[in-house]
Amino acid sequence: MRKLWLFIIVVLLVSCSAGKHSYSPNKKYSLQQVERDYTLYREILEEHHPSLYWYTSKDSMDYYFEEGKKQLKDSMTEIQFRKILNYVTAKINCGHTTVRSSKGFIKYNDTLRPGKIFPLSLKLWQDTMVVAANLNRRDSVLKRGTPITKINGRSGNEIVDTLFNYLSTDGYNRTHKYQTLSNRGFFGSLYTSLFGLSERYTVEYVDSTGQLKTINIPVYNPAADTFNRAAIRRLASLPRPSREERRQNQMAAVRLLQIDTVNHSAMMNLASFGKGFGLKKFFRQSFRTLKQQKITHLIIDVRSNGGGSVTNSTKITRYIADHRFKVADTLFAISKKGKHSRYMENHFWNRLFITLFTRKKRDGNYHFGYFERHYFKPKQTNHYDGKVYILTGGNSFSATTLFSSALIKQDNVTVVGEETGGGAYGNSAWLIPDVTLPETGLRFRLPLFRLVIDKNTPKDGKGVQPEVLSLPTVEAIKRNADYKLEKAMELIKKDKAQAQTPPNLP
């Protein structure tokens, strides 16, 4: 009996060990397998997505589905199949509908040592591509702020137009796509997945005299970067922060209030409206402090806030709003059950939620009537009545758009920066389960509710437009300037100067 148990334990250990290393990114799935997954992908979207034809007509969406199907000509790897799904998904024009790797791929990727990667981090906006960072630190030519015109013979516009085809966004929002490509590491990752990894890159750039020049640069190899390894060793030698210190650092990275008592101004950084960051308590304490310190000017930075809990975004809105407001004019799901529900994450709980909190109306949709009817009132305790400057950009998404939309028309609130990444008219979100395709394990996010923020807002596929525009410039990138914050500080300074100027006497 003891030998039998020993044998079973050995078999289990071997099986676990084999399971950890069984995934291979080079594994090819048969044509029949990817066709089954693709058919399932399309049917689930058509059955459950509330806005599949919101910004793309049914005829056009059918065309893109068929174009994706035509690319399934042979067996392919997960990465190859994911590329096709990314392309088709982007055509929906829904920023909450995105494709994700399989869990096996993610676990496998976590075990790999960093390999060679595209060497440049770029800041992109309309017709402009500028070096934000160069991983090859010894490169004295392509420094921060250097405009790039071509990479490996492809123009900047040609590259961007190609990459845009694989990025999901709300409506026709290009600001969100430019910002996504500008997020650290994203451009290089997507560029490599579409054009491949090169050992060397031929880069055309504009030098300090305005002349076009060309340089040949190597791919970045972390294994050969002695400077990077030395920095890692230095960090490793530092004392490890305590668990409480790590928690505080994580909290500060998401929400932080900084106060200038001399100038009676403050800045609140909000990187998320997600749960688990103690935001309700943070808001309560922050607005009490603002009142006690008699702060007259408040900057709220939501440029990196991708959204999260509507409860949290509504909570802070109530501290600032001078009028009652609604979260949505319309909020509905089109289905609560389907023949492929077993592939949808948390389907039982999502179906129960729709059953309990929505009601089917004449249009055939399941409406969340509470939010369609309910008006939220401004808070009375520690309500903030000073001047507010909300900093927005392409990463301001989802619940952050609700926050900006509710306050932008208010006299004491000014939105500064660029348009939000989230749609001003509305979005598809609320409940967003992952759908796992059974053959390849690939996943995609499936929003179940369509939300119209304000039915009187034009449905033009754009984000919330700033009242004071602050766009990037080559010079601002070169000096690593926070140009949106600088603009807000300039407005505060101007406002204070006007307040101190005595009125003209007759």
Image: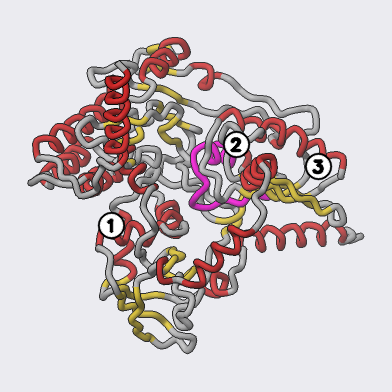
Q: Position of residue 274 (x, y in %)?
A: 56, 35
The residue range painted magenta reads 389-405
* Residue at (24% x, 43% y) in the render: 85
* Residue at (84% x, 39% y) in the render: 291
Amino acid found under the numbered disc labelled 3: Leu
Quarter occupied by residue 206: bottom left
- The question of residue 95 being in magenta is answered with no
Residue receiving disc 1:
193
Q: Position of residue 362 (x, y in %)?
A: 35, 13
From the viewer's perspective, is the residue at label 2 or at label 1 nearer? Answer: 1
Foreground residue among 451 and 259: 259
Q: Earlier in the sequence, mark 2 or mark 3?
A: 3
Amino acid found under the numbered disc labelled 2: Ala
Q: Position of residue 112 (x, y in %)?
A: 36, 52
Side (left or right) of 192 relative to 173? left
Q: Label 3 near label 2: C-beta < 8 Å?
A: no
Residue receiving disc 2:
406
Quarter occupied by residue 293: top right
Secondary element under disc 3, as helix, strand or loop, is helix
Q: Earlier in the sequence, mark 2 or mark 1?
A: 1
Side (left or right) of 391 relative to 354? right
Q: Position of residue 146 (x, y in %)?
A: 47, 77
Residue receiving disc 3:
290
